[in-house]
């Protein structure tokens, strides 16, 4: 489903567009699905550039929780950085997942179907987390929908992107220790 106000792809179970705040509650009949000819239908991937300010163990935990990697495979991905960590995602999925990693202090970049770095930071919401440290509903639903199809099956190394425009940047950052505990223990049932 696509937001009738801004045209961004959203999941059907949200009451408000996570990108522009448009209320989908008041008139659900106005939420229209746009055809693929009017919306980019390309697939996106996620490249782990570095752990940044996040620890390797928390980065590995996120890779395990979000994409379902084993602990050893997640640690191998971290050692190979910059390396692709997720694939076959919609623009919304790539944006949400990139923002989760970014708010933990992990440097990630989004790539398109041509393996070109693209900046989806413009899609970032003020924070992917609620004030209590839980994921916002739209992000939780989007991340919960990721599956083994989004995992990478072989290492695809990339050149390090430009730090100015290619690293996914958010406007908001919280302390990572609190979020790590909430994510590991609060989301396991939802994933």
Image: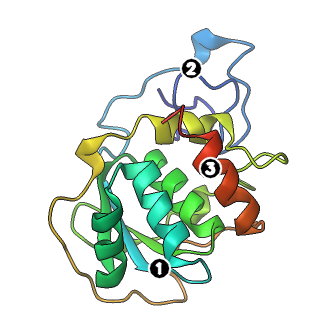
Mark 3 vs mark 1: in front: 3
Number of dots carrying numbers: 3
**Residue at image mark 2:** 31
Q: Nearer the viewer, residue 124 or 2?
A: 124
Estimate how packed mark 2 is, as few (under 14), some (14 to 19) or many (20 or more) residues with alpha carbons within 10 Å.
some
Tell me which numbered mark, 3 or 1, is placed earlier along the sequence.
Answer: 1
Mark 2 or 1, which is nearer the eye?
1
Does 118 appear above or below 79? above
Percent from the top left, x then y, of residue 86?
32, 58
Q: Do the CB atoms of the residues marked 2 and 1 lie less than 8 Å apart?
A: no
Q: Residue at x 59, y 56 (%)?
A: 123
Q: Is residue 23 above or below residue 52?
A: above
Q: CA distance from mark 2 to mark 3?
A: 31 Å
Q: Which residue is mark 1?
A: 166
Q: Which mark is residue 91?
A: none
- Within 10 Å of disc 1 (Cα), the crowding (few <14, some 14-19, many 20+) is many
- Please give the residue where the numbered disc 3 appears in the rendered image: 183
**Label 3 secondary element:** helix
> Residue at 77% across / 68% down in the picture?
175
Q: Identify the residue at horizontal 74%, vertical 38% (top origin).
A: 21
Percent x, y for residue 133?
77, 49
């Amino acid at each position: 489903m696509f937001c009738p106000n801004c045209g961004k792809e959203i999941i059907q179970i949200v009451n408000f567009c996570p990108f522009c705040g448009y209320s989908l509650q008041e008139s659900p009949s106005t939420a229209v699905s746009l055809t693929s000819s009017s919306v980019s239908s390309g697939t996106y991937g996620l490249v782990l550039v570095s752990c940044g300010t996040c620890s390797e163990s928390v980065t590995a935990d996120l890779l395990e929780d979000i994409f379902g990697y084993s602990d050893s495979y997640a640690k191998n991905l971290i050692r190979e950085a910059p390396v692709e960590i997720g694939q076959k995602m919609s623009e919304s999925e790539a944006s949400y997942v990139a923002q989760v990693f970014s708010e933990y202090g992990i440097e990630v970049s989004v790539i398109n179907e041509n393996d070109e770095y693209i900046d989806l930071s413009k899609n970032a919401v003020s924070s992917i987390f609620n004030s209590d440290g839980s994921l916002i509903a739209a992000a939780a639903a989007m991340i919960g929908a990721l599956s083994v199809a989004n995992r990478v099956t072989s290492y695809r190394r990339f050149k390090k992107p430009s730090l100015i425009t290619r690293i996914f940047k958010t406007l908001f950052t919280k302390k990572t220790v609190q979020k790590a505990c909430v994510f590991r223990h609060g989301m396991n049932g939802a994933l």
